[in-house]
């Protein structure tokens, strides 16, 4: 990775898993990394571990709970007060197949945390991003986005019987629709900001915390094993820092199965490329979060 000296980066969910490795790599490369976590003690513990590993940059822990839009707003306001620029926003935090539940604002947990929280965060931080030459927003999605054909707007507040995997897939489809739509809107303004998306293939992290052990073990076998977190972090790091990475694209592992390997452009589903769906989701998210993007 090229030197990131002087850059300011936010990584959500930086205390563990892929977010930890993204933050560590940026710190090693000289960036000031804001570790945006829902538990400050965990952020501090991760910061100490990173410092022991050593890096050319600096680290700062900050509280954000993506399941509460008031927490997202408070985090962003702190950043807007303290900083003049923001080079990298890595929308990484996420949960997968938790027991049925809703965010504080009444949305299905995965849709609320994985998508709406990051939609609101990016919108709040747009004034900083748009002032920073060459800033990038990278949003983590998943191969699971291929599992659904669209967003069911009648089920985003858990109106229908809960299907944990389907709701995860919907949240990850929303992540890509958002990432591509953000790029479209940026292009209409002439800003130098870019928005792209990445997925880590299959990576050994805490994401499986809600999966029963036997289901998890079967899945690992089906996938022919998982990659370590440092490798799962590479597509997002490529999207965030490579001069070759472009706005509006999606990056993931280059293996034949698309689940293992090193960063390359990945294919989005036809549902994720649907411009009308992206525009509809954007309108829905602005109303749901109360955050309007002012380009
Ligand atoms: N691992 C894979 O194979 C895989 C595959 C496809 C996509 N992904 C995507 O990659 C991203 C990172 O996942 P991971 O594998 O690194 O999972 P992970 O190890 O479980 O890490 C998830 C991170 O998100 C944080 N988080 C969860 N809920 C939050 C909330 N309400 N507010 C703020 N932070 C919250 C977690 O905090 P706590 O530690 O406090 O819970 C943790 O830091 C996710 O977006 C996931 O969907 C992963």
Image (cartoon, helix red, strand yellow):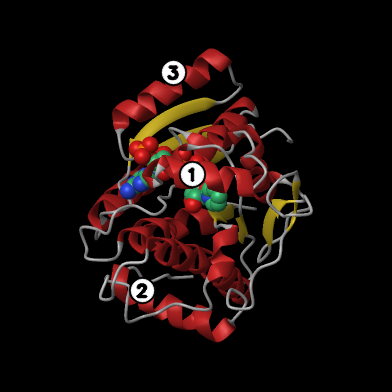
User: In terms of image quadrants, where is residue 286?
Assistant: bottom left
Query: Which of the two discs, 3 and 1, sits closer to the camera?
Result: 1
Residue sitting at 62 percent across and 76 percent down?
273
28 up-or-down from 22: above or below: above
Q: Mark 2 highlights which residue?
A: 286
- The x, y position of residue 222, in whole percent, is 62, 49
Q: Give the mark nearer the N terminus: 3 vs 2.
A: 3
Please identify, in this view, whether the residue under mark 1 or under mark 2 is nearer the observer.
Answer: 1
Describe the element under mark 2 as helix, strand or loop. helix
Using the image as rendered, state which of residue 16 and residue 162 is in the foreground: 162
Identify the residue under disc 3: 48
Q: Return the disc, 1 or 2, that comes first in the chain's sequence.
A: 1
Residue at numbered disc 1: 216
Ligand 1 contact, mark 3 (Cβ < 8 Å): no
| Cα separation between marks 3 and 1 | 30 Å
What residue do we see at 43% from left, 40% from top? Answer: 213
Q: Secondary structure at mark 3?
A: helix
* Residue 177 image label: none
Q: Position of residue 215 (x, y in %)?
A: 46, 47
The answer for how far apart the CA atoms under marks 3 and 2 are is 37 Å
Q: Which residue is at 64% across, 40% downward?
A: 225
């Amino acid at each position: 990775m090229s030197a990131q000296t002087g850059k300011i980066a936010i990584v959500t969910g930086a205390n563990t898993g892929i977010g930890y490795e993204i933050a560590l790599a940026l710190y090693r490369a000289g960036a000031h990394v804001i570790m945006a976590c829902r538990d400050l003690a965990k952020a501090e513990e991760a910061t100490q571990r990173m410092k022991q590993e050593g890096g050319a940059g600096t680290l700062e822990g900050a509280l954000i709970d993506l399941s509460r839009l008031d927490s997202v707003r408070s985090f962003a306001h702190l950043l807007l007060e303290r900083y003049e620029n923001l080079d990298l926003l890595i929308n990484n935090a996420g949960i997968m197949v938790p027991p049925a539940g809703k965010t504080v604002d009444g949305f299905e947990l995965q849709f609320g945390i994985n998508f709406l929280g990051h939609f609101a965060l990016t919108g709040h931080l747009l004034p900083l991003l748009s002032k920073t030459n060459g800033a990038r927003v990278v949003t983590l999605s998943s191969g699971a986005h291929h599992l659904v054909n669209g967003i069911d707007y009648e089920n985003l507040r858990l109106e229908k019987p809960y299907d944990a995997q389907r709701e995860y897939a919907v949240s990850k489809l929303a992540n890509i629709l958002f990432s591509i739509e953000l790029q479209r809107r940026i292009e209409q303004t002439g800003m130098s900001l870019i928005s792209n998306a990445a997925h880590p293939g299959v990576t050994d992290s805490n994401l499986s915390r809600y999966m029963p052990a036997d289901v998890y073990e079967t899945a690992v076998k089906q996938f022919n094993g998982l990659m370590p977190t440092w490798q799962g972090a590479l597509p997002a790091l490529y999207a965030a820092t490579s001069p070759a990475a472009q706005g509006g694209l999606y990056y993931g592992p280059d293996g034949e199965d698309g689940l293992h390997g090193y960063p390359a452009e990945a294919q989005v589903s036809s549902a994720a490329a649907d411009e009308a769906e992206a525009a509809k989701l954007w309108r829905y998210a602005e109303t749901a979060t109360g955050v309007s993007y002012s380009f």
